[in-house]
Amino acid sequence: MIVVEDTVGPNGPHPVLAVTGLAREARLAAGPGVATVGAGGDPERLRDVLKGRAGPGCRAVMSIGIAGGLDPDLAPGDVVVATGVSAGGMRHSAHDRVVAALARRLADAPARVVLADVVGVEAAVLSPHAKARLRAETGAASVDMESHVAAAFAEAHGLPFCAVRVVCDPADRALPAAIAKALKPDGEPDILAVLAALARRQATLGGLVRLARDSSAAFASLGRCRALLGVGLGVPDLGELLRDVA
């Protein structure tokens, strides 16, 4: 089941589309002027969901949620406002005026906020070695499985794209494959899959405790960012963007 919630706020009938992987991310992103869509950490399913929309039905597209850290200076809870997203040798730029507006909104965030590229992948990047290689290849600060899909959708419909991603597992932290895949199609955690991974020794209790601590820091930071972004996730409407140009 896919999470989709449409709400209309004071910015008009067309909301900002928040693209997420986890159900918890979608719940945090939801609010006035926001429509949320998620596909449980499956980029191909996300593409199908976006293709299935009757029309774009939005005025901008934001990828929002937690991410893996690639920049070794970033810690759990640090925030990346994307300047662009790369994937498969291609790069999609984020809308520069939207990036600037988001950076202003998040200036009071207690966490570190950086403006940098992110990279989108089709499968979770699990090891510190793989993260380091991806960092060297792309220069990206973080990695997730939705931003490149969201950016391609925005480009196909001529819409502004942006992304706000909060680091969960830092660059030097490994993720057990079984845990990274322990998601239901609706983006909720699959507790039975986690317990099975522990029973088969595909994950350790210590590793789970560490991941839980990192996740707690990341989601707490994401919640604070969401409060600062406000209506429509802080994305200026088209009229504001055109006035900026004038």
Image (tube, grey):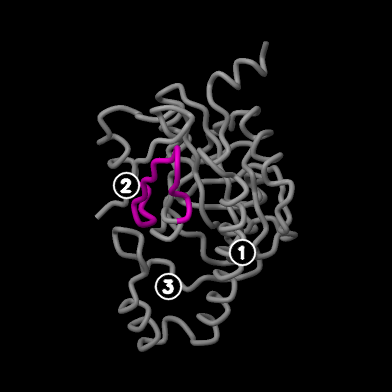
Looking at the image, tell me whether mark 2 or mark 1 is earlier in sequence order: 2
Q: Nearer the viewer, residue 87 or 221?
A: 221
- Which of these two is toward me, 140 or 112? 112
Please report the bounds of the magenta region as a residue range. Answer: 28-44
Quadrant of the image occupied by residue 8: top left
Which residue is denoted by mark 2 in the rendering?
4
For the point 39% across and 56% down, the residue is 41
Is mark 3 in CB contact (under 8 Å) with mark 1?
no
Compared with residue 160, is residue 122 higher up or lower down, i.e. above or below?
A: below
Tell me the SS state at disc 1: helix
Residue 179's label in the rendered image is 3
| Discs 2, 3 touching: Cβ within 8 Å | no
Q: Is residue 90 magenta?
A: no
Q: Residue tagged by mark 1? A: 129
Q: Does dot 2 land on a helix, a strand or a loop?
A: strand
Mark 3 nearby-residue class (10 Å; few <14, some 14–19, many ≥20): many
Q: Amino acid at mark 1?
A: His
Q: Residue at x 62, y 60 (%)?
A: 221
